[in-house]
Amino acid sequence: MDGGDLAKRICATLRQNGHRALLAGGCVRDLRLGRPPADYDIATDARPERVLELFPGSLSVGAQFGVVVVVESGLQVEVATFRADGTYSDGRHPDAVTFSQDPAEDARRRDFTINGLLMDPETQEVLDFVGGQQDLESRVIRAIGDPERRFREDKLRLVRAVRFAARLGYNIQPATFAALRALSPEAAQVSAERLRDELTKILTEGSARRGFEMLEESGLLQALLPEVARMRGVEQPPQFHPEGDVWIHTRLLLEGLARGCSPTLAWGVLLHDVGKPPTFSPPRGPEGRIRFDQHVEVGARMAEVICQRYRFSSEDSDQVVALVANHLRFKDAGQMKLSTLKRFVRLTRFEEHMELHRLDCLASHGQMEAYEFVSKFLTETPPEVVRPARLITGNDLSQLGFRPGPVFREILQAVEDAQLEGRVVNRAQALDYVRSRFPSGALNATPGEGQAT
């Protein structure tokens, strides 16, 4: 059973008990477009308490707004009572709702016409009270009713308009776009988590370049990610970046992002050169060139601030920052010591570093030698050679007479370097290496300490 089957069963149960029940919103839009819906919503004249009675164990997540989530076999379907909304003083939730028996009234409170369609799941008949089918055919994103009012009700809709237009390849209707531009500064009032999730969807739904171009055209980019907006017009040295300025380069990378790619990769791509605008230095002298000294370090700090602003998890923030901080290291891969190279490819989710580097090259000079070198190394080097088991521990160092402290880290890293470079291959050789390179601690050991067994 999938979400569609569960939704049909819920509708059937509601109807058998004397209620109207219709598929609603995005699932109807997707079904009309021949796309599998990500989730299913139902609109009904049954009150929340009645839905809870008919479906025991359901979640009353928003009963005051007429919303109940029916859960079965790990699937969830949202069931909402037909309603009309009052004013939205918080820019997200209506202050009060009035339950209704009229599906048309329910459709007219929704955000965009293509999301205001209702469907009878048995007959497949579409109920269109807002002109959504015509806008699907015309490939238009249009607010239902007064665009400014719709956006003020829930200011996340400003970003959602761009996401739907980008994902579907639609245009935003002129009056809707005019209201969006006028209200774009107010998008920053939306909670960080909701904005993060919506921006991530724009980045990962397969049309990231167009989405971010529309964010810029609408003023939303300046409101939400001013650090990225500053990339426009920042020139780059043509010998390395014949494609143009930092914003052009970044948009080319966004264009290369695959649909469904990892969110951290997508944010790493977006922010990999965020440190260039504040570190731009024009050419000096006839042989000089544009420089961005320390842009990687500056960019990593900026990426961390952005991740904190949008409430990323610590794990995801660390990964985005690591992608920014390491994206230039590939150019040195061919000259790295073997131990350095092995540590480099052991970075968490290294496949994301590889993909960022590949996109970075394709969007600039097109030179893939470093990418091919690292790819070949990963193909030819077994994982147990890249990440071998440790030969000795801190306990061994204590047995050799070293006192715990910073020296432990120095010695263990030196031993691992030697191991990664093939100069020591077993415990006995590792202990001999420590005795020879760090004799001061070993001299304090009593007879028999640290002997290989």
Image (cartoon, helix red, strand yellow):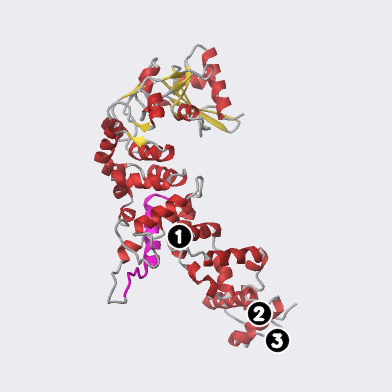
Alpha-carbon span between mark 2 and mark 1: 35 Å
Q: Which mark sits nearer the N-terminus, 2 or 1?
A: 1
Three-letter code for the amino acid on which mark 2 is drawn: Arg
Query: Residue 171 location, x and y as percent?
Result: 35, 36
Alpha-carbon span between mark 3 and mark 1: 57 Å
Query: Residue 419 location, x and y as percent?
Result: 64, 75
Alpha-carbon span between mark 3 and mark 2: 26 Å
Query: Mark 1 — residue?
Result: 360
**Nearer the camera: disc 2 or disc 1:** 1
In which quadrant of the rendered image does the C terminus lie? bottom right
Query: Mark 2 — residue?
Result: 423
Q: Visible in this render: residue 76?
A: yes
Residue 295 colored magenta?
A: yes
Local secondary structure at mark 2: loop
Three-letter code for the amino acid on which mark 3 is drawn: Pro
**Nearer the camera: disc 3 or disc 2:** 2
